[in-house]
Image: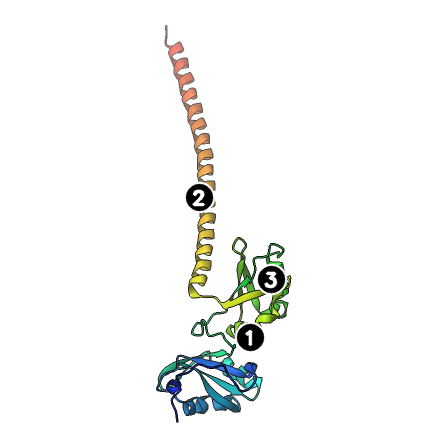
Amino acid sequence: MESIQDFNVTYPPTIGDDCLKIFLSNLDGRINTQDLHTFFSPFGRIEHIESWTPKSAIILFSDMDSIDRVLLKYRKCIINKQEIFIRRFRYGYIERAYMDSKILFIKPINNDLSIKWNETTIRNCFHKYEKNIEKIRIVSKSFHGFIYFKDYDIVDRILLQTNMFRINDIPIEMKRAKSNEKQIEDNDIHIEKLIKRNKLLKKQIERQKVDARHEIKNLKRKINKLKNELIDLKSRYRY
């Protein structure tokens, strides 16, 4: 059986519906088509296996349920001691294939000022997946945002429907969020916490200032009282 790595050409998939395919990446010479067939055939009938690049391949199943079963169990697997990444197939799109993320990066193809770039607009655009959305983070100035989903495969499903998502008839660019994009979000949360902490400290300082002023007034009153008592004593023993 010919090794996946023995394919030296890259060509578009020629057989079957793209929605019935899974994309496998990180393959090497330890894995051949028979290995792939043996591992994935328990999930459903395999129609075809072909190379995508020297280190990736696609598997065509006979039905969508087979793909759902694969991805319900695996996002990555081990075959012949090699870690393989599994995604739903998206024609012409292998960027970030190794990455797994429940966060979807979105941005309008054109920064059209007619777009109301807010949470309501984005939720309306992705209304079909409303029940799967945990939260939305918007970056208004640069016209992009992050949608946090409950499940990794939801992101894959959405990425297969690039032309389905538009705002004011403007297509939306979509990608899996990078780890450093997640770090940016985490940093923002940390900054927000620091800002809240700073406000709290300012309030505490103001209260201390108020308390200090009250304490100063009390001390002044005590000093004045002592002065008056001293004057009274002096007046008593003057003669």
> Label 1 crowding class (10 Å Cα cut-off): few <14, some 14-19, many 20+?
some
On screen, residue 30 above or below 122: below
Q: Nearer the viewer, residue 136 or 16?
A: 16
Whether label 1 touches label 2, CB < 8 Å: no
Whether label 2 touches label 3, CB < 8 Å: no
On screen, residue 130 above or below 7: above
What kind of residue is marked 1?
Leu
Disc 3, SS: helix
Residue labelled with disc 2: 201
Quadrant of the image for the C terminus?
A: top left
What kind of residue is marked 2?
Leu
Residue labelled with disc 1: 160
Q: Nearer the viewer, residue 107 or 118?
A: 107
Disc 2, SS: helix
Disc 1, SS: loop
Res 122 label: 3
Nearer the N terminus, badge 2 or badge 3?
A: 3
In this view, which residue lies farthest toward the top?
239
> Label 3 crowding class (10 Å Cα cut-off): few <14, some 14-19, many 20+?
many
Q: How many badges with numbers are in the image?
A: 3
Q: Residue at x 46, y 59 (%)?
A: 185
Measured in 3D between alpha carbons, the distance from the residue under mark 1 to the one under mark 3, in whole angstroms, is 18 Å
Place of residue 203 in the rendered image (x, y in percent of width and height, measured from the top left): 47, 41
What kind of residue is marked 3?
Ile
Measured in 3D between alpha carbons, the distance from the residue under mark 2 to the one under mark 3, in whole angstroms, is 37 Å
Measured in 3D between alpha carbons, the distance from the residue under mark 1 to the one under mark 2, in whole angstroms, is 49 Å
In this figure, which colouring scheme has been used for the structure?
rainbow
Nearer the N terminus, badge 1 or badge 2?
A: 1
Quadrant of the image for the N terminus?
A: bottom left
